[in-house]
Amino acid sequence: ADGAVVTISLLQLFETRDVSFNKDRSMIKKRIRDGEGYETPKDLAKAKMSVEAATDGSSTLAGFCAQTLEITVGNGEVCDALECAVCEMKKGERAIFTVTNPAAAAEEKLGLKDVKADKVVFTLELIEFEKSKDTWSMSEEEKVEFANSRKEVGSQLFKAGRLQMALGRYKKVADMFSYIDNFKEENNKVKAKVLKQACDANKAAVYLKLKDFTEAKNSCNAVLKEDTQNVKATYRRAQAELGLKNFSDCIRDCKKVVELDPPNKEARALLKQAQAGQKEEDKKAKGLFANMCKALGKGPIPEPGKSASLGNFSDDEEDAPMDVAEEKDVPMEDAAEEKQEEVAKEE
């Protein structure tokens, strides 16, 4: 035969995407049936969701019981994985969600209080949901009320250790009140400003728990930009500076907290940690500089056009941090005298 004819038909097309909180591929959505329209549930929407299956990728998880769950979105009434999933679905949509962080998929209502598998694969359908009011269409009073409820839910989630869920609630409030100059009622504007500052400070607390010290510092700066005397934001920025090993900045903030709130024991304890850290950094910097001074003038004279080596340093010496701001503490005169003595002996 001269050849063969192969007919290929595309039966289905699946969309897959990362829907995890941090976009770290810990939760992947695979849509297997499209839903209606474009709307997805938002915070405070009432949603009905069917959890049809929960497997480890092949076998049904022990204890699993299929359920239709009715929840208020964003309140933490179900596990993080399902909370995240429902916000990514349209009415009537069916999807498979693969969760590689089993703790996020532990849901007692489904018989999955303790998940032993390495991953959890949910098959879900969003049956229906009530569309909640968009924040842009709310009145000033409604926005303040909505923001206050989100802040309170965020605090409950934070206490429960559900940090990503709490962070999402705080971010929503801070973003909603990023611009309030168009508020007509001064009373509402004041309330909105207070809520934003509180949620920015609470964002910092979450980021500190997550060890994201840069974002924690940024959140504190957002508060201190409007309120330079805010004790809570100053203390949390000091914590972030310690995490970033910016010891001098941490010391500065700790001293300010003690000035604003003299009985603050936490700030005094943090100040001692920062001072100890700065002392250690100074010690490393002085040691490195002393070694550099001792190495000057040693070794063969390089040929014209070639740079001289500053000596043989160990890996530890090469990698040691050098803080230019601390050079004023380096005993340069002592090092120079030692060098002069060495030259005299050689002569």
Image: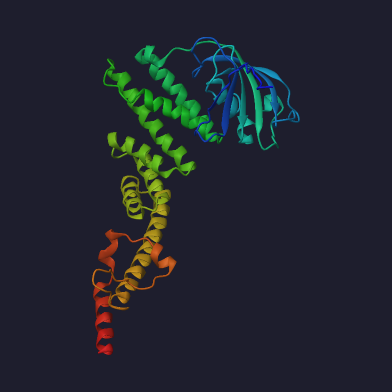
Tell me the quadrant of the picture where the C terminus can be found.
bottom left
Residue 175 x/y as whole percent: 37, 26
Q: Position of residue 338 (x, y in %)?
A: 28, 81
**In the depicted view, which residue is nearer to us: 90 or 9?**
9
Q: Is residue 284 left or right of residue 93?
A: left
Q: Please name whichever residue, 92 or 281, is drawn nearer the observer in this view of the structure.
A: 92
What percent of the width, then of the height, locates residue 311?
Answer: 35, 73
Image quarter where the N terminus lies is top right
Q: Residue at 28% across / 60% down in the picture?
A: 324
In this rendering, the answer to whether 242 lies above or below 107 is below
Where 251 falls versus 232 (above or below)?
below
Residue 264 visible here: no
Which is nearer the eye, 272 or 323? 323
Image location (x, y in percent) of residue 76: 56, 26
**Left or right, residue 99 beside residue 325:** right
Q: Residue at x 47, y 37 (%)?
A: 206
